[in-house]
Structures are given as C-alpha cells and as structure tokens.
Amino acid sequence: MPEHAPETSRTRPDGLLFPDPVRAIIDVREKLAGLRHEKAIVVGLVPTMGSLHEGHLSLVRAAQASCDVVVVSIFINPIQFGAAEDMDTYPADLEKDMALLASVGTDMVFVPPAGELYPEGFETMIDVGSTAKGLCGQSRPGHFEGVATVVAKLLNIISPDRAFFGQKDAQQVVVIRRMVSDLNFDVEIISCPTVRGDDGLALSSRNAYLSEDERSQATVLYRSLLQARDAVAAGETRSAKLKRMIRKLIGAEYMVDFEYARIVDPWTLEPVDEVEGPVLVAIAAMVGNARLIDNMIIEPGGGS
Ligand code: PAF
C-alpha cells in the first residue's frame, strides 16, 4: 500500500483510495464519459438499495469478472414502496456500505438524493405488463412499476453494457428483462445465484428485522423449496400437490405467515399445472416485520 494512503474504510484492497459516492447525475455521466474517452470499456451496473450484504457483493464480483468498470448504485427508491410498506424503516448505513464496497474494490458508487432522480414535476412511470401482475405484484400493486421506472432511469444515466441482479428477486428479473426487451435498452441483464446463510435463509436486507427465533423459523422457506425439489425428483409433477406441501410445511412455523406459493414458467411467470420442464417455485411469507421471498428453479429429473 502506498505510504500516503490512510487506513480508512475507503481504502481499497489494492491500496488505492476508494472514491467518494457520486451524488449528481451530471458527475456520474462525466466520469464515465472520461473513462470511455480514454479507451473502450465494458461497464457493469449493480443497482441496489444499500444495506449491502454478501448477496450484493456477489453481484459486484460477478460484474467485475466480466466488466472493466463497475458502478454500484445505492438508492432507496420511494416509488417502489406501498403506503403501508417499510420505506421509512428500510435499513440504511452508507458508511458500512462504502466500507463493504471498498473491501471488494468497486470503481464507482452512485448515491443520488431522491430529488436528483425525482425532481419536482416528475410524473412519467413505466407501465409493466402481465409479468408484474402475479406473485408479489398481487400484494404489492405498483411495486414493479416503481422498480422498472428506477431501473430504466439508472440504465439511461449509466448506459451500462451489463446490469446485474440477484435471482432471489426472480420476478424483478423477469419484469426487467421484459422491459429491456420491449423498450430496446442496449444492455444485457444478468441474473446471479441467490446467496444463502449457513442456515439456508436467502440473504436479504430485510433479514435485519428478524429476531433470533424468527430467523430460525424463517428457514422454512428454503426447507419448503428443498422439499418441493425432492418431491419433483421423486416423480411428483402436480403443481397443486407441491403447493399444498409447501403451505403445510410453512404453516407448521407459528411465526411465519404464509402469503403464497406459486409454480410458474421461469421466463413468463405463467402458472404451470404439471411440472414437465423447468419451473420456478416462488414463495412469500411475513415473518415478524419482514416480508420474505425465496424461489428455486426445479426440473423433473433433478436440478435447481
Ligand atoms: O432489488 C433491489 O434492490 C431494487 O428493487 C432495485 C433493483 C435496486 C431497484 O430499486
């Protein structure tokens, strides 16, 4: 490490100083234009709402593996939260996030204030179609319109070649792929595997709301997916039966409030009655104050 580089949370592993968060659209565009002017670069974008964990870092690493410059955005997007949702309590700790990003060596962190993305008079939203209606869309009306709109804005601001999302938010990935295809965004959407804790619980910023007991019971989400996978491997093909099994297992945990279990086509999210090829098994439940989701792609003859 060079002598002048202070030992701060913003020191990158390679000894270089980690850049401060970029707040203004004009600055992030200018910095990227400068880099693009020097030489042809592949830019990767990892959009986040902060409260970063190993799942987010795995996206950054995936981006680093195939891109020259990686931009992480941190923005708690108000328009994707319903009135009764946890926007106001959503965990936020920018210093911690910056330290984590420094530990993996991110190139640029875009942290716009809300007024930068939604200035006075903002009113244009992306109206996503059928992919946003089922699963989480049923209990979170407007959520995916909010996600699609902010992702569209980030894609327009950063113009990345690739954008990276976690497969834990499987419906989000499908909605964004649809939008990118329908609106001709010139970007490749890459979905990265769900990262789990040792107990199998999918990593989520909302896990921070869980007590120890709630966390232990929340592992039933993953256990129910494994049970469905095993049942399909053993020859069960009826979606109705698989969904009943999942519901029963989740119902056995008194702290877990079952919301849905669906078996759908992984690309269109259309319901599937008989498991004859790869299907997405998606579940949602409330555990204490945390609304948790999880999913697995399952296919007859094994694989997930
Ligand atoms: O997955 C998330 O964290 C958010 O939905 C996203 C994609 C950053 C948009 O706000």
Image: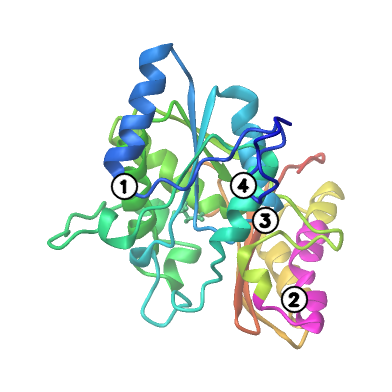
From where the camera sits, is residue 34 visible? yes
Q: Which circle marks residue 53 in the picture?
A: 3
Within 8 Å of ligand 1, the CB of disc 1?
no
From where the camera sits, is residue 276 visible? no
**In the rendered view, would you say 40 is above or below 71?**
above
The boundaries of the magenta stretch are 209-228
For marks 4 and 3, the one nearer the N-term is 4
* Residue that label 4 marks: 10
* Residue that label 1 marks: 24
For marks 2 and 4, the one nearer the N-term is 4
Majority secondary structure of magenta residues: helix
For image coordinates 64% across by 52% down, the residue present is 99
Q: CA distance from mark 1 to mark 3?
A: 25 Å
Count the numbered circles shown. Answer: 4
Q: Are marks 1 and 2 in contact (CB under 8 Å)?
A: no
Where does residue 157 sit, x and y in percent of width and height? 31, 38
Label 1 environment density (alpha carbons within 10 Å; few <14, some 14–19, many ≥20) = some
Q: For marks 4 and 3, give the one nearer the viewer.
A: 4
Q: For marks 1 and 3, give the one nearer the viewer.
A: 1
* Residue that label 2 marks: 250
